[in-house]
Image (tube, rainbow, N blue to C red):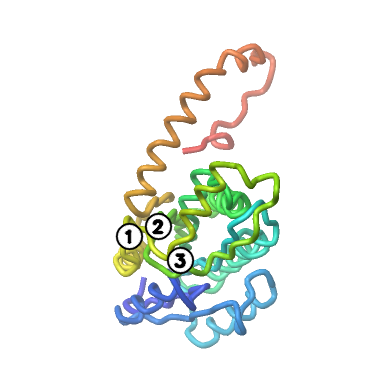
Amino acid sequence: MSHHQVWFITGSSSGLGRTMTEHVLDKGDIVVATLRSPELDVSNAQEIKNAFAAAVERFGRIDAVFNNAAYCILGEAERAMFDVNLWGAINVSKEAVRVFREVNKPAGGRLLQISSVAGIVGVPGIAYYCAAKSGLNAFSEALSREVDPDWNIKIVIVEPGALRTPALRKTVRIPSHPAYLNNKAMLAQREAHSVDDWPWMADTAKAADILHRIAASPDPPLYLPLGTDAVDFARAKYPQMVEATDAVVGLSEELRVEMTDVPAISAGAMRLG
């Protein structure tokens, strides 16, 4: 990758996106910074194509895409977030991969998918946000196995914990549905989001520096829980999944099919690692 990297950053108006934009510029790299209003609506696929085309026309290539545009609503399940948090992120991903593969000479690039610890653990009160981030994780993991290694495209699923950004203040809070008024988990979430700051929030500038270094790595990780809280959630979640699986494995054994007369399934097609 060249000395001066060209970054394409969505959701750059505030929070991690803005910090990342400032950090990349401080490092002497180039940023095409986009935000929802008025320049770019990531839920509009044509606007994304136009933005990428303008960046390529100006700079000739794009080395790293910071796929960050998202928002959150605190309340019962809210579907509208999928347009931005999942479908918008997918739209950006598809165009990023196309540019990395077909435009960049030599081919290659880094796609940093800004997911969330909420993509690891279901959090009451932000169910659709969690679902969108979980969906982004699954999409990105599958995409990482679809791209040809010769294209030199590396995908990083970034799962930040609590970062010191204006995100809490910008969370939209809708009134509770009457059925949830006495739900202790929902009440706890509303109380937690009633403040502007949490003491364990990590430094956003340090997070930006880590992500800038990760993007420059020749072999970045596919999954990147970011923050000690995110690491704790990940370490707790996956053993729980293994334990839950082990508890019901006998039921699946009842469904075992003898494969002696069935053509072998390609190990490559089924491989998850």
Q: Position of residue 35 (x, y in %)?
A: 55, 78
Give the image quarter of residue 73: bottom right
The residue singled out by tag 3 in the image is 109
Residue at screen point 35% across, 76% down = 24
Residue at screen point 49% across, 82% down = 60
Check residue 202 in the rendering and tell me which mark sits there, or answer none.
1
Residue furthest toward the bottom? Answer: 58
Q: Position of residue 33 (x, y in %)?
A: 49, 80
Q: Position of residue 91 (x, y in %)?
A: 63, 65
Tell whether label 2 touches label 3 (CB within 8 Å): no
In primary-sequence order, the first of circles 3 and 1 is 3
Q: Name which residue type carries label 2.
A: Ala
The residue singled out by tag 2 in the image is 162
Tell whether label 2 touches label 1 (CB within 8 Å): yes
Residue 25 falls left or right of residue 46: left
Q: Name which residue type carries label 3.
A: Gly
Residue at screen point 47% across, 73% down = 105
- Whether residue 147 is situated above or below residue 61 in the rendered picture: above
